[in-house]
Amino acid sequence: MEDEHGMDSLMKQEFVSVLVRDPQVHREDFWHTYISYEICLHTNSMCFRRKTSCVRRRYREFVWLRQRLQFNAVLLELPKLPPWNPFFSLNNPLQVKQRMEGLQQFLEIVLQDPLLLSDSCLHLFLQSRLSVSKMEACASGRTRYSVAQAIQRCVCESRRLPSEDSDSESTTSSTGLGYSGEDAPPRSSSPLCVRKPDP
């Protein structure tokens, strides 16, 4: 009987699982290329509005997230990101793999801290497709939509767009939710979700 009770409480324990995977190269123009990584989250934690999500982020967005988390939780010692490397090569699978593993370790440590779990920037980073500038605006209350609405709209957008495994980046970026704030101006006047007509 005691073992059964112990198993029930173990099953009800909260968990947050994160996986950083599937590096993809994106070409902005002739001179500028970057890699985005898919971040998949699976949880039963009450801290998260969505229990599963997948978004793509690039290294500079991780840098932004760490800066925001440090600013909002001054007394905490945050984990380090893999260091920026001026000789980082998109064509070097070992460097790409090492960076990806470092990004995952960073998120795993961050997601274990209850204080950081309450940060709206973390939730927007993990569960919305907003650019950095839009995440900043949303987290500070300077948008027409709340953090919860931004995350919910990401759900409705996911239902209309090709699956995350698709190689079609252009469909996703046509929503105006670019992968980062400084990279490209939005292509749509809508701050969040662009509904495409059904064929």
Image (tube, grey):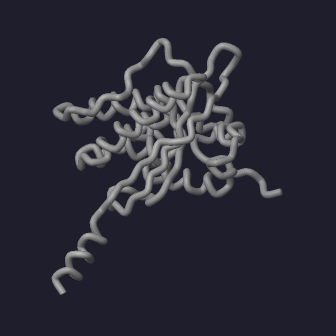
Left or right: 28, with 112 as reference point = right
| Residue drawn where x is 51% and y is 36% of the image | 57
Query: In terms of image quadrants, where is residue 170?
Result: top right
Where in the figure is residue 180, as x and y percent of width and height? 53, 30
The correct choice, above or below, for 102 with respect to 86 in the image is: below
Q: Position of residue 111 (x, y in %)?
A: 31, 47
Give the side of residue 18 with respect to residue 160, left or right. left
Locate the C terminus and report the quarter of the image it occupies: bottom right
Q: Quadrant of the N terminus?
A: bottom left
Q: Quadrant of residue 13?
A: bottom left
Name the residue at the bottom extreme. 1
Question: In the image shown, does 62 or 190 lie closer to the viewer?
Answer: 62
Residue 164 vertical placement versus 58 (above, below): below
Residue 22 in the image: state x and y as whole percent: 56, 40
Residue found at x 67% / y 24%: 27
For image coordinates 68% across by 55% down, the residue present is: 160
Q: Residue at x 52, y 49 (%)?
A: 54
Given residues 94 and 121, the one toward you in this image is 94
Tell whether 57 sits left or right of 5.
right
Residue reaching furthest to the right: 199
Q: How many marks?
A: 0
Where residue 118 appears, as percent x and y from the top left, is: 29, 48
